[in-house]
Image (cartoon, helix red, strand yellow):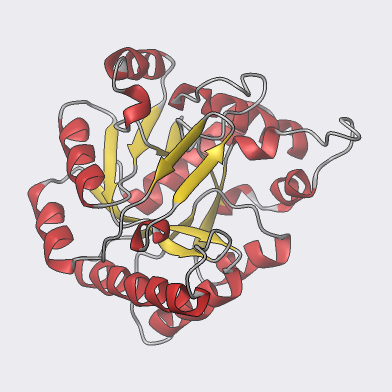
Amino acid sequence: MTDSHCHIHFQGYKDDMEEVIDRTQTRGVRMITIGTQKDTSKYGIEVAEAHENIWCTVGLHPNHVHKQTIHEDAMDAFSTREETFDKDYYRELIKSSSKVVAIGEVGLDFFRLPDMDKEDVMETQLVNVHHALELANETNLPVVLHVRDAHAEMVDVLKQYIDSGRLDRRGVVHCFTGTIEEARAYHDIGFFTSFTGIMTFKDRKDPEKLTPLMEVARDVPLEWMMVETDAPYLTPEPHRGKRNEPWMVIHVAEKVAELKGVNVEEVERMTDENANKLFKLV
C-alpha cells in the first residue's frame, strides 16, 4: 500500500531513518516523502533517489512563510523560519529528479496564525500559494495541499485556475479534517482527500461513539480517498503517544475499512490506485 504523505527525511528520523525505511518496506508500504521548505525539499530528493519505492515532493508549507513555533502534537514542536515560494529554485529541483511527483506541501493555514497582523499573514500565504499553483501548472505536476480553517478560500483559489483551463493534474488535500460538504467541494473539482491517524482517535467522553471525522471518512467514497501518516506526527491508534512511522498507515486503512464495512484489502487497493493515478507512480 502507499503512505501518500510522510516526512521520512525529517529530523525525527535522524538516528534511524534507514531502519524505519526497512521496517516500512518490509511491510510492503511505499512512501511519498514531503518537502516543506527549500532545505527539506532538497534533502527529500536525495532520500528518494537513494531508495526504491520512495518518491518526493517539493514545496513551502504555509506556516513557513512567517516565523512561529508549531506544536504538531504532544511529542513534537518546531520553529518555522520565514521563506517565500521561490519558483526558480523549486523549478530547478523538479528538473533535477524524476522522483519529484508533486508540488507540496503548499496551501493555506488560517488556524495557526502568529500574533502579528493576521490579515497580512493571510495575504502572504495567498501570494505564496498562487506562486506554487503557477509552477504546478507550468510543470504539469499535481499539488499536495495543506489546508486548515481555510477550505472555502482554498476552493475559490483552485477554481480560478481550473475554470481557466489550468491545473490539469489537480491534487490532494492532505490530513483532511473538514466536513463532508467541504470534502465534496474538493471532489467536485477533481481533488482527492487524504486521511491520517487523527481519524483513528476516539471520542474521549464516549469512546464507542463515532467522531465527526470518522463519519466523514465513512462517507467519502474510496474513489476520492487516500491514506497517510504525516509521520513522524499524528500517530494512529493503537500506537498513539509514540513516534509515528510510515508503515503505521495500515492502521489508518484498517479504520477506514471498519467504518465502511469493507475488507482492508479493498481500501489498500483503491487508495493505491488513487496514488498511482495522481502521482503517476507506475
User: Residue 247, percent across and down?
Assistant: 47, 22
Residue 210 lies in quadrant: top right
* Residue at 75 percent of width and 39 percent of height: 260
User: Residue 252, percent across and down?
Assistant: 61, 32
In the image, residue 118 sits, relative to residue 211, either above or below, namely below
Whether residue 261 is visible here, answered yes or no, is no
* Residue at 12 percent of width and 46 percent of height: 97
In the image, residue 35 sits, relative to residue 53, either above or below, namely below
Indicate left or right for 95 with 249 as reference.
Answer: left
User: Residue 42, percent across and down?
Assistant: 17, 44
Mark count: 0
Whether residue 58 is visible here, answered yes or no, is yes
Indicate left or right for 1 with 7 as reference.
Answer: right
Q: Nearer the viewer, residue 134 or 235?
A: 235
Residue 144 lies in quadrant: bottom left
Indicate left or right for 266 with 30 as reference.
Answer: right
Q: Nearer the viewer, residue 11 or 162?
A: 11
* Residue at 78 percent of width and 33 percent of height: 202
Q: Nearer the viewer, residue 253 or 147?
A: 147
Q: Quadrant of the C terminus?
A: top left
In the image, residue 17 sits, relative to residue 138, either above or below, namely above
Indicate left or right for 70 with 198 as reference.
Answer: left
